[in-house]
Every structure is written in structure tokens, then in C-alpha cells.
Image: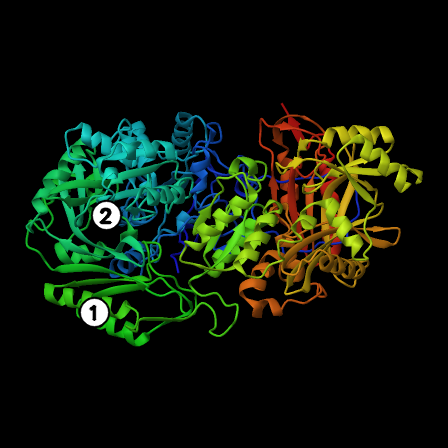
Amino acid sequence: RHARSVQDLTYTFVTMGNKQSAAAAEGNAENLPPPAPVNSTSSPAAKDFSPLKKTMTFDDRSTSAFSNRAEGFGLNNTALKRASTFNAYGVQGGSDAKRFAYHDVMYRQHFNMQPMKKMPSLHGMGVLKAAASAASELPPPDDDSCVIVVDTFSTGAVVAHEAMKRGHRVVCVVSFKDSGAIADMVPAGLELNFVATLGFDDTLEDQDQALDNLVADLEKGGFTNVLAVMPGAETGVKLCDRLSEKLGVRTNGSAGTEARRNKYDMGEKVRAAGVRAVMQVQATTWGEIQTFLDNWELTKTPEIFEAIVKPVESAGSDDVTLCKSVDEVKAAFGNIMGKRNGLGQINEAVLVQEYLSGVEYVVDTMSCDGEHKVCTLWEYDRQPTNGAGFVLHGQRCMTADEPLAQELIVYLKKVLDALEIRNGPGHAEVKMCRGTPCLVEVGARCHGAEGFWCDVIDKCIGYNQANVLVDTYLNPESFAALPAEAGATERKGYGHIKFLLSYIRGKNLRISQAALDEICAMPSYLGHEILVKEGADVVPTIDCFTWAGSVKLAHEDQAVVDADYARIHELEMIGGGLFECDATDEAGTTDAATPSDAVVVVDPFSTGAMVAAYANNYGVPVICVYSAKLEALKEVENLVPQGLELHFDHVIGQESDDAEEAVAQTLAKIGSLPLNVIAVLAGAETGVGMADKLSDALSVRTNGADSTEPRRNKYLMGEKVRAAGVRAVAQRECGSWEDVVSFLEESGLEAHEPYRIICKPTESAGSDGVTLCKSREDVEAAFKKLNKSTNQLGMWNEEVLVQEFLDGEEFVVDTVSRDGEHTTVACWHYDKRPANGQFNVYYGQHALTVDQDPAQECIAYIHKVLDALEIRNGPSHAEVKMCRGEPCLVEVGARCHGAEGAWIDCADFIYGYNQAQVTLDAYINPDAYATVPKLPTTRKGHGALAFMVSYSSGVLKNVNEKYLEEIRGFKSFVAMEIFLKPGQKVSPTVDCFTFVGNMRLTHNDEAVVTADYERVREIESSDDFLIYE
């Protein structure tokens, strides 16, 4: 669908300085210590991982893990990380942490950053085809001079090519370290031959030093005779100002840069110059917005209230939202704040503005030493479409002699002066609001959209802003010859850009060749681009990132262009014939989701976030429900996979501490939504109770609320299993020391040699608080520590569970059930060993198939347990020990296997499916669910999930890169993640909350996985693996 990435273009690369190291590109690795049993592994060869920059919202770790699982969500090897929810970090790193209040998070629609959206690549047009053919005929440079273009993305690539056509050597500078998929915002068909490509390290704390480093790299490469530094894309404006100033070439200077990039500062600076500007507030918290709205006159007249909410820094109509109530403003704030925008940058603040009603125009300018000339005028055709308020249908080329043009030009020149744009391009959007022009925003760069507009303008007026930019900087005399205003000389033609919109949602898209042939035969046709793919899923167009394509139109007769534009609109409409598709699911399937169907995920933390992401991938709306006040969930908020394209259509939080009242309020809120709930799933252990009650009340597939307590309380769990005649652990729930003593004496457990008693919280996850006691004194100490305490899930331990010690190896049985029929999707062998004074530290897990003992025996036993606990629908994660030759339940949760879904890579490679995906299929895609084997009988490969263990403590300086490089070179390596960052206090690992990191290993050869796993154990026990300050 998109243009080739920068790496795919024909570049001559001289990569120098500021190059991201392999370690930085892949994130840090992990390592683990002593030898231990292994039963699995397997995987394709090591993959290349191209990281997305993590700078904000739910992540406080500086290193990244990269996983092929993200590909299913439209991501390319992005990081999945534990996230420290609600901590915000600026683009320069994690030093300026900010704690958000409850309401700031309550209305966030996205966990983590939205994956980088790619600008449609509109190639196949005459100007770009001509440019490509000319590239091979570039004249050799006459001297050692060069031109720098900062961020050669979008129209920046056209600017670079224009400079090359004129015989100049061009150096490409990338303004941010992890450019990721933004490199795809490049017109296909350009043959760009850069003499060097240099990167600027925007992550360096000292940005002056980073600039000095870049200049030093230029000098090392011999690029000292710099003729010009030109902005390519919006992302490069800041660096272009600083670098051009530093090198002493034509510049706008760095003093006013912020106001030229930050929309709030822009408006305030324009207002300060006495020029009309929009009423606005820039905010990072809801409280700031509330104060602004409280003092705004329009808030007092709700019937005419209209406000715009948008990111402070972005491009196009990316997340620009028209709000007609305070509640809508709050929801829009939640959707934008902390999300990665379409330029690949994190939205660190939100702009709330008065709504400027009226027609929107574009004024594209070129300036030289403070003199401004107008290259192009456009009238935007924006209309409410598909529920979005500002969808751009097209744009019409104007000239300076048209009505309103002179008003726009005079006003915009004042804006340029106010913002100190004295040199170079300007791309301004202006609205005629109540009879006067008012700035929407202006960028100190060329009109974007990858330069697809260039040849339309060439047909209309004979030149375009991109080639004017190059001429102005490299041949100032040409600027003097440029007309002061677009079309001031004789107009050559009329032109439109018509963006193709989708009005349909579904699968198996069909594009009518007859309709395309009709478009191509139109008298004004210049070229077109289709951005959607035949046979793929399709969604309605709501912004420039969901366009279905574009058509360029130009002709000497305006009536011809207008008629062709209108006819294309008829063709793109439903029933027009250009686009058709099938419904999302086959009609007649009982559980098939329809556009109004939705899934509720309660507490979408850990693997629950993955389940929600799978629903997103299906196109099913997701309602996020928090099971308690966010303050009560603070310990699990940080268990969220980073980097998922995870969007919630609605978020419902709790305002009451009373559980029943919370359920009633949640049901009322769900009932008010225009959605039909077809499934309620527990995302994390904390959400099981609420999920049972909601599903029961909504009459969808449910396990019922009657047996929720035994599915959450470990003591009741054991007793209910025992009452069903199934083997269960000897135990007692004790609220006092006297209760403990009574149990020990009555059970006779103290007579066993050696002395082994387990004490643990009644409600928790993982090995949190689980204590092996070797004497009655140990039991007493453990009881006193756990009783009346808060566990790692943030839950209160009212009592302590005292149990017999189940000696033997531990296994996991992961199951998905539907109407009482159980499908076991995975069986894992836990690698648990004594370490750091804890008897059962979790080192990793290896997948088994049913033919490997004791998988079949464990599975049959767990199916009985599920029946006993009335787990008839949805996922379950059961831990079982083979104790004295028979399986015995440790515990089971009515939710997916946790560990933030780190095991999914392994499961997919080994079995060909995973529990999170199968869970969603069980509810909304029963045909797919029916194809999953009832038992894990087929092995496609081998794999292991390894957790890295610390044996030491101190303040971390770094993880030894030598070992990380070795791990990345493993034949079975898939991905790894280091949870620690420099400066963080490291403790010896005793539970899942003190791991160093994790690693996924897969390979077709089990011996390869085993060897790599054991090497990890050796590495983590090395004295120099963790380097301390």
C-alpha cells in the first residue's frame, strides 16, 4: 500500500557518525544463570528488528524488545515492553517523569504509543516519473560543495531530487535517531543518490553536544562547503533552523523555532504581534483544560459550543477532532495525549482551540531575506464524512486574482513576519472565519503529501514550491524573477486533487477496473494512485491516513475539471461501483461480529492487552473496563505490552469502592453505548470477578458469578476441587496464628520429612509472596509477613493460605473453553529452581506436546479441575505439579497465561496458534476456533521463554554489551527485553517482579534451543553481566 522505505530506494549511502548501534536498534538483551532442565526450543533464524522510538506514556524502561508478534497488528517488529503506566517522558529521555491524575488516564483511548502511521505514497505521477528518469543523467559536481536536506521524507524527497537534478551533491540528515516507518513517507520512483546519510541523535540529553557531533561528522566526511540547509519534512524544521544557523548559511534562526513547530506557541506569538489568532490552551492534564473551558464564554452556551482538540505537533488532520460538548473534549484529550502521531512523534501535549467555522485555504509561500512570495493557493474541500468532522475530499488550485485571495495573502504575510519566517518555504492553512482570515497553522517547510501536487501546479501556473525552494537557496537571482503571487501572470490551466474515500468497512475489497478505466479516460486525468489493496480489509476514510487513493486532474477548461471531480465522487460512494467488499463476517454465523458488535475487556493488562489488540485487528470495537478505581490498580498498570496498536472505542472506569455499585454503574454505561456486547473477557487476574458479573448480567457466554470466588480465592479453589472428588492440596485459610497451629497439628503435615510447608497470599499472581517454610518458626515468620498486607497485584491479603508442599516438577496447562468444551492450546514445563534464598524462582518455560510425559495426564486432570470450578467459557491458565506420581493443582486463573504475552512468539512457532488469539476466536470467530486441535498434538518447531535472573544487587551502570551481542547472535534468537535501565537499583531475583529481562528462543532443531538456553544460564551468572556504578 505504501511507498518503498528509504532503505529500498537507490541510495548511495556513506553512513557516518550518530549511527544507531545494533544494540540500540534491537534493544537490550537478557541473560540468565545456573544450569537447569530444558524441554523445548525452536525458531527461524534471527530476525532484524527496526525499533520505534519510545519516549512517553506507559514505559519507563530505556531498552526495547522486538517481536514478530507485532506484525499481526500492523506493526513491524516494534517493541513489546512492560509499561510503567501513567508515567510520561519527554522526547529527550525519561528524566522528566510526570504522574498523571486519574482523569488524565481515564479518558485515554490508547495504551502506549500508537504505532507509526505511514503517509500514503502517491507515486505514479508524471512529475515523479520524469524525475526518476532524469536521475541517471545528473551532471558531475563541479566542486566539493554540497546541499543538506533535513528529513528527506514526503516532499523533502522531491526537494532533494530537485537539488540533484541541478548537479548538486546532497547530504541527507535524519533529525531523529529512530526514524522507524516514517521513512516510508517517500514518493516511490525517485532515484536518490545521496553522497552521505547522517543521523542526528535527538535522544542525547545535551542537544547542543548532539548538534556539535553532527557538525563534526560533516567535517569528517569532507562536507565543509555547505551551500544550503533546507527543510525536507515537518519533523526536520527544528534541526534545519539550528544547523543552518550553526553553519552560517541562509536561515530563519533557532530563536523562533518553537513557535514555528508548536501550535500553541505559534498562536500566542501571532496574537502577540497584533494579528488575529485562535483562542486556545495547551495542556498535558485534564485539569488545565477544565480551567480554560470554565473561563470560556462558549462553555456557558452548550447549544453552540464547538471546540477543536488536536496534537500540539503533528501533520495533516491527524487526530484533529471537532467537539460539541465538554465530554467530547475530554474523550478527544484521552485519544491524543501520549499517543504516537502520524509523524512518528509522541503527543506530549494537547491543544484545545475555538472552532474556526468557514472554508479552509492553503497559502504556500517562499521567502528570501524577509521578502515573501506566494507560490500556490489552494481551497480545501473538507467535509464531515464517516463520523469524522474534517475529512479532506480534495483541493482546488487557486490564483491570486480570485475573490478572497488578496485578503488571505496580506494576512499570511503578517503571520510569516510574526513567526520570523524570513527564509524558505511556508505551508499555511487559513480559515475565513466570520469574514476575516484566521490562522489554523503554518509549517516552515513545503506543502507535504509527498509532492503529489507538483505536476498539477505545474500545469496550472508553470512552477511549484519544491523547485522554487531549491532555486531560491541556490540561485537567489531566480527568486527576484519569481512572480509575487501565484497566477499573477497568465493562468495556464485549472487543477484539482481528488482524494479517493472509502465509505465501506469489510473484507475482500474489490476495485472495479471498469470504474478505474473511466477515471483514466477523463479529459483532465493526469495520474492516480490506489492505496488500498485488492482482497484486503477496508475501513471507512476518516483522515489522510485512511485515504483509498488519489487522482490528479488538470485541464485548460475549469468546467471539465469540475465535472471529472464530481464524477469521481459519485464512483467512490457506496453503490458507485469503484469499491465493494464483503461484510466483516459471513452472514448467518451465529457468533459472527457485525459492525455494531463489541467486546468488553476488563483490565486489559498483561496478555489481556494482546487479546484486546486481536479484537482491534478483527475490526471489532473494544470497550475497556477497569475493575476498580485506577488508584487500586496501580500495581498492575505497569503490566502492559508496549507498542501494540491497541485502541479502545470506549473506556469505563470506576468511581465507587463498592463492588456491586461498580458493576451496576458499568452496566448502565455499557447500556448507553450504541454497541451490542457479544463477549466479556478478563484481561488480567484482577478482572475475573467483574468479567463474570458483567457477562452474567449481559447474557453472553459466561462462567457465571456464582463460582467466581473459588476461581479467585486459592483456598476456596482447592476446597471446591476437593469437593468434586478431584485431588487437591491439603490446606487451610488462616486469619490468626492459632488457626495455623490448629491446621498443622490436625493435618499431620509436620510429620513428613523433610519439613516443608507453603505459606502464600490467598489472592495474587505468579510466585508473589509464596514462601517455603522448613520449620514451624519459618511458618510463623511467613504468616506474620503476609497477613494483613498488600500483595504485588495491589490486593489486600486478609488471610494467609497454609498448604502442604507439593514436591515435584511444575507444569502449565493453558486452555480455552466454549460451552463447557475444553481446548488445550498449550502445555508448558516450568523451569523453577532455588535461587537467592527463594525456593522456586522462575527461570523459564518450554512447550510440550501431548505425546510428551506427563502432558496428557496433566491435561486430563486439569479438564476435571475446570469442570469442578465451572470454567465453561474463555481462557484458563492452570499450574499443576506432579507430586508423588500424580498431578495436583497449584492454582488456576480464569484468564490467559500472563507474562505480558512474552510467550506468544514461542507458542505461534511451536503450535501455530496461541491462547490469546484462540480466546478471541472462541467468542467471535467460532469457525476458526473449531479448527484448533483439542489437544496440542502437532509440533511445528521448538521454543523456550527464558527469564533472566539477577544474583547481585547495586545501582546499574549498564548491561554488558558483549553478552547482549552474543545473545543476539544465537541461532534460536527471536527477541529479548531488558527490564532494567542505567541508574536503577537492582536486587537479586526472587519473583516475577524482580527479573532482569526475558528472551524468546525458537528453532526447528531442539538441540539448538537447548544449547542457547543453557548458554543464557551461564551468561546471567557471570560476574560482569550486570555492571554496577
Of the residues shown, which amino acid type is indicated by label 2? Ala
The numbered mark at residue 567 is: 1
Residue displayed at 48% across by 27% down: 95
Judging depth in this view, the residue of 307 and 867 nearest the camera is 867
- Residue 677 lies, in percent from the top left, at 48, 59
Q: Quadrant of residue 936?
A: bottom right
Instruction: Decide: is 861 above or below 475.
Output: below
Vertically, is 1002 above or below 239?
below
The quarter of the picture where the C terminus appears is: top right
Q: Position of residue 614 (x, y in %)?
A: 52, 57
Task: Judge whether 53 appears above or below 273 on screen.
Answer: below
Res 466 label: 2
Q: Residue at x 30, y 73 (%)?
A: 575
Mark 1 surroundings within 10 Å by alpha-carbon count, few (fewer than 14), some (14 through 19), many (20 or more): some
Which secondary structure lies at badge 1?
helix
Judge from the rendering whether residue 1025 lies leftward or rightward of residue 852; answer left or right. Answer: left
The numbered dot on residue 705 is none
Mark nearer the viewer, 2 or 1: 1
Q: Is residue 155 left or right of residue 948?
A: left
- In the image: residue 435, left or right of residue 496: left
* Extreme residue toward the bottom, this view: 514
> For the residue labelled by badge 2, is the local secondary structure a helix, a strand or a loop?
helix
Residue type at mark 1: give it. Arg
Visible residue check, residue 444: no
Query: What percent of the width, then of the height, locates residue 733?
Result: 76, 40
